[in-house]
Every structure is written in structure tokens, then in C-alpha cells.
Amino acid sequence: MSNPVSRILCPIDFSEPSRAALRYAAAIATHLGAGLTLLTVNDPLLAEAADMSGGTGRLAADAKSELEKFFRDSLPGSARRPPAELVVATGGSAAEILRHAKDAADLVVMSSHGATGIRKLFFGSTTERVLRETAVPVLVVPRGDLGPETMADMKKIVRRILVPVDLSAALEDQVRVAAGLAETFAAPLLLVHIVEPVRAVVPGHAYAANVDSERRGRAEQRLNALVATLPPAARPEALVMFGEPSEEISKIANDRGVGLIVMGLHASALLGARMGSVTYRVLCVTNAIVLALPPGATIRM
């Protein structure tokens, strides 16, 4: 059973990409009646310098004031602004995002890229670290996306949902979440498995072609059986392709007008959730929003 989203965390670095992420977070929070927390993180060295020159807590107070203004300016009109908790933390940006997500969030909404130069607080490499360590689903907004004004606008953005699957044990949870989203956004669901061709030591060896054909057949059988269990309202479709996974996923997303990709995060028994190279490359090149699901995490919108 998927868990309803009751609290959303949105990290803010005052850049345009984080403004877009805020608009997504606000639209989802308004639709679900969920709580919304805006988090900005001050660098410890800057906080210490500000305390010495302007008094204890000066930087935190200024940051909270700026966060309030950013919230109002990003969502003009009170109808678009859900109630929000504004939090200013001091420390490592990724660590603070992960800590607040673990303590009080069912979903994190953040941009794949943020401010540059001196204002580059926690996006880019920090988004990568969050995805590698999170135990909470993360909705990643691509660079250049302006964000929706309402949930109706978000439905227009989503259009079609792509679910790249690797036929692992986490497949059913991933597909269950995606099917629920397909219902929420009235968007057709496309399940895709990419078969990486076997590279034989001896070029042109017949066994390689036979193995590829067999792997494709097994994948098609598994996906078709899964599609048969999904509600017709999701308009599910299965597709098996050959190629390099991240390239094929990005190409399919572009060709089929996909607005949302639901990807599972790899796991390690020792270290927990891990993003994986395919997810990383897809995030680098796709123009779609991406919902990254850590192992065992399920949500309902």
C-alpha cells in the first residue's frame, strides 16, 4: 500500500531553479492538503562571521526574512500559497536536507541545478548526494523548468509517465507508485526495459545473439504480465528495447512526450540507497521531471 504524502520538504537557495521547485511543491501541497516546509542552509563559516560582526543569529534572521520574501514573490496571490513552515539551518547543505527529510518529510522536491558562484549552496553535486543517501522519495525538477501555477498545470506538464524498470525485486513497488500517479494525472503509463546487448569476446559469435533474444523474450513476458495487472485507466503499455539504458530512456522520453519519469534508486546492503549511473545520466540529460524512489519507499499523490 502506498503512503499518502502529508509533509513536503523543498530546499531553497534563492535561484530560479529552486523557485520552479517551490512551485511544484506548492501545487502538490495544495492538491493534497499536505504540509510544506521550506529549508535554506547557511554555511557555518558565513554564520560565524555574521555573528561576530552583526550579533548572534543575524544571518539566520536575514535568511528567514529573505525566505519569506522569496516564498511570496514565487507564488503571487494567497490562493497559490499553502501554509508553509520556513526553516533556516546551518551546516552542510546535503546533510541538512537529508536530516530534515528523515525527521519530517514524505517527499522532497528540489531542482537538479541551483545557483552558481558564491550562491551555489546545495544543488548540482548536493542533489546527487541527496539521491545517493535519501530514504525519502525525491522529485527532481530539471533545469529550465519554470514550474506550474496549479495542479492542473502540472497535469499538462506530466502528459505521459515513463517507468524504466530493471526487473529487480523493487519492480512492483515502483510500478505501483507510477500507476497511482497515472491515475492522479490522467496520464498514460509506459513501462520500459532496456536490454544491454551482450558483448561477446569473439566478435559475431552466434551465442551472443541467442542470449540477447532470450533476454528480450523474458523481459517482454514479465512486462506484459505486469501490464495485465494494472488498471485500464492507467492506459499501460510495455516496451522492450536494446541499447545503452540512459540514452534509450532519454530518447524515448523525448520521442513519446514524457513529462514524468519514475525511477528506482539502487540499494546496497551496507550503504543503503544508491542512485546508480543510469539514474545519474538520465538526470543530466532529460527535460522531464524525475521521481526517484529509494528502496522500499512508496507514496501516493
Image: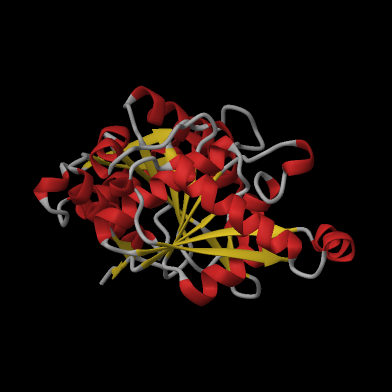
What residue is shown at x 35% (from left), y 35% (from top)?
259
Drawn side of residue 299 relative to residue 278, left or right: left
Q: How many marks?
A: 0
Foreground pick, 153 / 269: 153
Query: Residue at left 89%, top 65%?
Result: 52
Quadrant in which the C terminus appears:
bottom left
Q: How was the colour assigned to the protein in this rendering?
A: secondary structure
Residue 121 versus residue 158: which sits nearer the camera?
Answer: 121
Horizontal and vertical percent position of residue 162: 34, 41
In the picture, which quadrant includes the N terminus? bottom left
Question: Which residue is most to the front?
Answer: 54
Residue 47, visible in the rendered structure: yes
Quarter of the figure with residue 107: bottom left
**Viewer-nearest residue: 128 or 10:** 10
Residue 71 in the image, given as x and y percentages of width and height: 48, 48
State whether residue 86 is above or below residue 128: below
Q: From where the camera sits, is residue 198 visible? A: no
- List x then y, in percent, for residue 26: 37, 51
Residue drawn at the location 32% of the way across and 33% of the way down: 157
Q: Indicate the quadrant where residue 214 lies.
A: top left
Q: Is residue 42 above or below residue 142?
A: below
Q: Position of residue 190 (x, y in %)?
A: 28, 40
